[in-house]
Every structure is written in structure tokens, then in C-alpha cells.
Image (tube, rainbow, N blue to C red):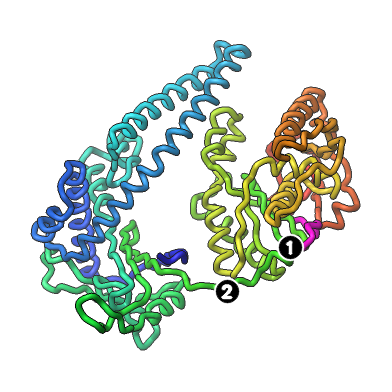
Amino acid sequence: MSKLPVVTYQTRLRLTPEQSASLDVYAELYGRAQRTLFAKMRAGASMNELKRSFLRRFGLTARQFNAIRVELEGKIASIRERRPELIEELQARIKRGQKAIIRLEKKAPGSNTLHQKKRRLAILQAKLASLSADQESGRVRLCFGSRRLFRRQFALEENGYADHAAWKKDWQAERSSQFFVLGSKDETSGNQSCQATVAPDGSLRLRLRLPDGTGEPSKHLVIEGVRFAYGQEAILQTLSAGRVVIAQTKTVKLVRKREGSAVSYRFVRDRKGWRVFVSVEAQPVALVTRRLAGAIGVDINPDHLALAETDRFGNLVEVRRIGLHLYGKSEEQAKARIGDACRQIARACAESGKPLVIERLDLRKRRAELEAVDPVRARSLSSFAYAKTIAMLKAASFRAGVEVIEVDPAYTSVIGAVNHARRHGIGSHQGAAYAIARRGLGLSERPSVREAVVPTRNGGHVTFALPARNRTKHVWSFWSDVRKGLKAAHAAHARSGGNRLPPAPLLPKARALGATRTLSAKPRHANRRQHCSADVVDDLPW
């Protein structure tokens, strides 16, 4: 099985009213067949018997039935794979919520905040009970058309519906708004049911096989002039990669067999019309980086990406900060900003010839934090797409020929704050990125000082003595004790009012490494909402 990633490109189709109507009928038949197949599968029917009956009942080809089956099995598999993680995540969120309620009962026993926390805890416990019951029974719940739209029928006026019939019209349209065309590498043009050919003007010509159950007079729908603003060359390269080879089978000595790359299509209808998504296997890219040159570490944070570059000996070369102000942005705006930042990082790695080192983050712990943090922090965490950033970093690095090294994130922030921040005059996040880069190179993580001087958010610092190290244990055991001392020092610093002091000037070494600061007319503590703009680089040792 190939390990190359699958990339998807999309474009909007220019269709006549007749062509659009044909796709509407196809999508309606596809959705009805998929929902029926899911009901039959839950009833325990045999797949072979279902295939024979579905081909006759819905007028499908064997390949079209396989597309419905593969998509449905993928949905079911993803739910079953995700469910244990959701249960573990809910257990962690309930535990944090219970601790928050205990603290509020002591501080504000009759507050509205305590009441809302209890309501939230009851909701989480109900979700956990439902998921646990499904896990034990093996039952899978699927809502075709999205659960959010389904719930809108219970508040018609608030969601802009005049009556239930108007909602039902949208509901039925959403349940029949797309269909999938499965590809295979041994078929012509990578797909038997939808074949793409290159027109003389360089555009693509799609020849889509319609199901017999649609009642269309023609078996095929031809769509001309399909162009992709991004990915056209990759699709053309995939279509031209197919070749005919001579293979040997058990019954026939020699047979002509076609080998190439599978090309799958998904047609999706939205408010503006129909779009087509083409999924192809990415072409292999030669690596342009090597670990002997050093590494570039990235520390992912809700509002920025911190970068630290090292040489082959693990010495710090440069630090950078790329702002990611995603709060208040739409999903597409957030994806655009994250994509720009990831391409910038991949380009820097390719130019320097150094691999990219990232953390293997546990997103369940991140989501569990939402139950115990303040509302501002919770909105920041929920607005930031950790998974999307990691996926885009890997995709951009693959296209640029950059090796991606994933490391365990244990204690990188503590190591960066204690070992590197004060020593190099950089921020704690840049120090964490530096620790990540060194871990990717397999370098030492031993403590470099006996007394920790860790910078704080306002430019000051906290100081505490490091515990004695037991060399018979792993070094992470030592950093676990250091983290406890660091938390206690930060708490004492906050109680003493140290966070309200004005920031200290930058160290000369920090300026030499590339750290900058934009001065403000007001001190930082005067307004917590005061931030630099998205284009301002802020590398203070905070």
C-alpha cells in the first residue's frame, strides 16, 4: 500500500440547467441508496445479498454501489475509531469541571457562574453515558444531513423558517447534496465511472456515468471546460501517469494490465451551484533537507507559532515569531492564515536545508482544558485549530521536500523556560521551540543551571532553586519536579503583584537573535485586550 498522501483539489463547474438537473437527480438517488444501505447494514444483512438487490432496486452499476459502500464504511469506521477518544476526553473534562465546581463552591457559593458550571457538568455526564452505552453495544449513530440542521426544526423562527415545510425542504436538499465516484489505479484515467480527458485548450472534459435509476435518456453526462485554479498540473500529471504493463496470473500466463493512480471525484452542491473535488495521490518529492545541517523547531500556540533554528551542533542560530490571530475569523479566513504561515515555515526549512521538528500533540488534553480556564482563554483555545495547523505543516513540508520529525512534547516548555530563555535572551515560547529542535536532533536535555531564572509575561522573571537530580531515573522525572516548582514560583509572583510591573528592556543578545518589540503608549497591564496587529512581530521574552 502506498504511503504517499492524497491531496484534493476543487473547482466550480459551469453547467447548463439540464446538466445541473441531472446531477441533482444523481445526488438524490445516491443519498437515498446510502441511507437505505446504512439501515440494512444495522439490521445485519449480508453485503453480497445487499449488493445484488441494490443494483436492481436503484439501477446502480457495481462500481457505483462500491462507492456508496466505501464512503459509508469510512463514516462508520471513523465514528468507531473516534468514540474511545471522545469518552476519554469527556472523562477528563468532567474531572476538570468537578474541580472547578469545588473551587467555586468555596469562593462564590451562590454565583451564576457556579450554576452554569453545574449545568455544563450535567450535559457532559449525559453525553458520556450515551457514548458509553453505544460503545458497549457497538451501535453507530449517523445523522445524514448534519445534526445541526436537524435540530433547527425545534426552533423554526429563531433559524429563519416560516414553517416546518420550509425546514423540511432544506433538510431534504442537504441530505441529497453530494455524491462520491470511487476511483481505482487499474481503470482508465484512474476511474471507471468518471473519466477525465484533456481538451485541446488545456481544460478537462469529464465524462460521468449516470445510474440507470435516474431515468436519464443518456447514460453519460459530459462536462466541458473544467479548470482548476490550483492543482491543474498535478491532476494532468496523474492522468498521464497510467501505463499498460504485462503481468502473469494463475489462469493466463501473460495479460495486459493497466497500472496508474486512482482518481476519485466528489460532486458537491452549495448555494451557488455544483463543485467537483478531485482526489489524487501526491507525486513523490525529493528531500532537500538533512539532519546534519541542524533543525528548525516549531512551538504551536493559540495566537502564534514560535520558531527556533539550530546548527548541526544544536546551537541556537535564530528565533522568529509568526502571529496567528484567529479569534473572530471565519473558518476559511483561519485556514488561509494558517496556510500562509505553514508555507512560510516550509519555505524557510527548504532554503536552509534543515528538517522541521514539531510536537506530537494530544488534542484531547487541549480540549479538556476548556472546562477549567477563564472564558477569554477558553475562546482562544477553541478558536485555534491545532489539528489543522499540524496537517497544513505536514502538507506544506511534503510539497517543499522538507522532512518532518515528530517528537514527544513532554516538558519542552519547562526545558525551554529554564535552560534556554534567560540564557539566550529569548521568550519562553521560543525557548520551547529551541528545546523541540534539539529533541528532534537527539541532543541532551540535562539542566544547564542550578538556579532557574525564568522570564514572565511582563518582562520580569522568577527565580527558584532546581531540585536535586536522581541520575538513576530518566531526565524527564527531574523535569517533572521542576515543573511543580515553576508553577509555584509563577503563582507566588502573581500574588505579589509582580505581573503588574512595567516590562524590562530587551537584552542585547535577544536583539542579535532577531527579537523585536513594538512599544505601546500604555503599559501592558493597563488593558488586557491590547495586542499588536497581525503584521507586527513581537518576540519579547514573555
What is the x, y in percent for residue 430? 74, 49
> Toward the viewer: 122 or 434?
434
Relative side of 162 to 240, left or right: left
Q: For the point 54% across and 40% down, which residue is it? A: 382
Separation of disc 1 and disc 2 at Cα? Answer: 18 Å
Q: For the point 36% across and 88% down, which residue is it? A: 200
Mark 1 crowd level (few <14, some 14–19, many ≥20, 10 Å Cα): many
Q: Mostly what secondary structure, the magenta segment?
A: strand
Report whether residue 535 is seen.
no
> Toward the viewer: 373 or 3?
3
The N terminus - image quarter? bottom left
Element at label 2: loop
Amino acid type assigned to the residue bearing label 2 in the image: Ala
Q: Which residue is mark 1?
A: 294
What is the x, y in percent for residue 295? 71, 60
Relative side of 87 to 419, left or right: left
Corner quadrant of residue 483: top right
Amino acid type assigned to the residue bearing label 1 in the image: Gly
Q: Which residue is mark 2?
A: 286
What is the x, y in percent for residue 253? 24, 82
Report the magenta residues as a range. 312-321
Mark 2 crowd level (few <14, some 14–19, many ≥20, 10 Å Cα): few
The C terminus - image quarter? top right
Whether the magenta-drawn stretch holds residue 89 is answered as no
Using the image, determine if residue 7 lies above or below residue 488. below
